[in-house]
Image (cartoon, rainbow, N blue to C red):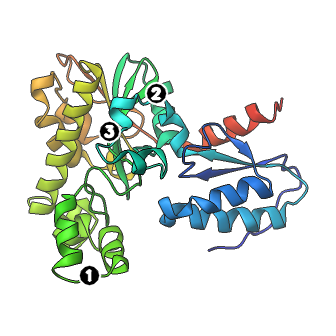
Amino acid sequence: METFGAVPDDVAAVGHRVVHGGSRFLDPAVLDGEVIEAIRDISSLAPLHNTPALEAIDEARGVLPEVPHVAVFDTAFHATIPPEAATYAIPARWRDEWGIRRYGFHGLSVAWATEQVRARRLVVCHLGGGCSITAVLDGRSVDTTMGFSPLEGVPMATRSGSVDPGALVHLLRERELSVEDLDHALEHESGLVALGGTDDVRALEGTLALDVYVHRIAGAVAAMAASLGGLDALVFTAGVGERSAAVREHVCRRLDFLGVELDEAANANAAPDADVAASGSSVRVVVLAAREDVVVARAVRQLLAMS
């Protein structure tokens, strides 16, 4: 992890993005010993994200010990997801005692998109190293593809997305993979890298990797539209969503039955923030720059009642 350089002398507070807040953290929280330990306790749910966040928090508090530090949680935006979307069909003990449920992630990015693109029925495609598709109804998250962990959902750069759990049990039992081997493969050796040898979508045009990627994304958008009862606007954000005209084109082509129609020239030349729907499209299509930093900063200011 990079160390801090020169620190400005006018820092009033520090905000930290924390990916997984579990069931406890539904709002931003001032970081003290108790909160930090609670975040540490749930780090196994998102080890690729919460563990580095805790390291950054420790270092930042050491460099700036006199100012408040605030954690802002990606999962919090999805606290509004109704039970039918959040509940897995698994034994009651797993759900009730062990907290196995769908939490959802990329909430800060989705919150920003929800503010910038005003629509009653909105689907946000956060497509970066991690990918999720979220349904937002009247400003509230009602369904999303990531679940208990950021591993569920559509394929990602190195993460598998959803896989038949029976296949995973088979690998553990019949191929004698260790839990550690399975975890590493699903997190680091799957997704676009596994299918195409790279996570650079520019190099994957015409390959099975890109076909799988856009097929699953388009299917997820359609599922989110079903949760919303229709679709008024579609947002593409994060690295791939903002930069890949080809991915946007391939996904939208599969969604024409929902009334999605791209302006090919606008899409090809789009730079965030841009509307790229054709004039006759019944669904607004927006390429939007992700600004989680702004959402975090505002949450810190509001929590601490700063002017």
Query: Marks 2 and 3: CB-CB under 8 Å?
Result: no
Looking at the image, is mark 3 or mark 1 earlier in the sequence?
1
Helix, strand or loop at mark 2: helix
Q: Which residue is mark 3?
A: 270
Q: Which label belongs to residue 304?
A: none
Q: Which label belongs to residue 177?
A: 1
Number of numbered discs: 3
Looking at the image, is mark 1 or mark 2 earlier in the sequence?
2
In the image, 125: left or right of 73? left
Q: CA distance from mark 2 to mark 3?
A: 20 Å
In the image, 107: left or right of 147? right
Depicted 275 relative to depicted 3: above or below: above
Q: Which label belongs to residue 114?
A: 2
Residue sitting nearer the eye, 301 or 164: 164
Looking at the image, is mark 2 or mark 3 earlier in the sequence?
2
Helix, strand or loop at mark 1: loop
Quadrant of the snapshot with the N terminus? bottom right
Three-letter amino acid code of the residue under disc 2: Thr
Three-letter amino acid code of the residue under disc 1: Leu
Q: Looking at the image, which residue is at 76% across and 51% down?
A: 31
Query: In which quadrant of the rendered view does residue 258 lie?
Result: top left
Residue sitting nearer the eye, 84 or 240: 84
In the image, 202: left or right of 59? left
Task: Characterize the local packing of mark 2: few (<14), some (14-19) or many (20 or more) Cα atoms within 10 angstroms.
Answer: many
Q: CA distance from mark 1 to mark 2?
A: 42 Å
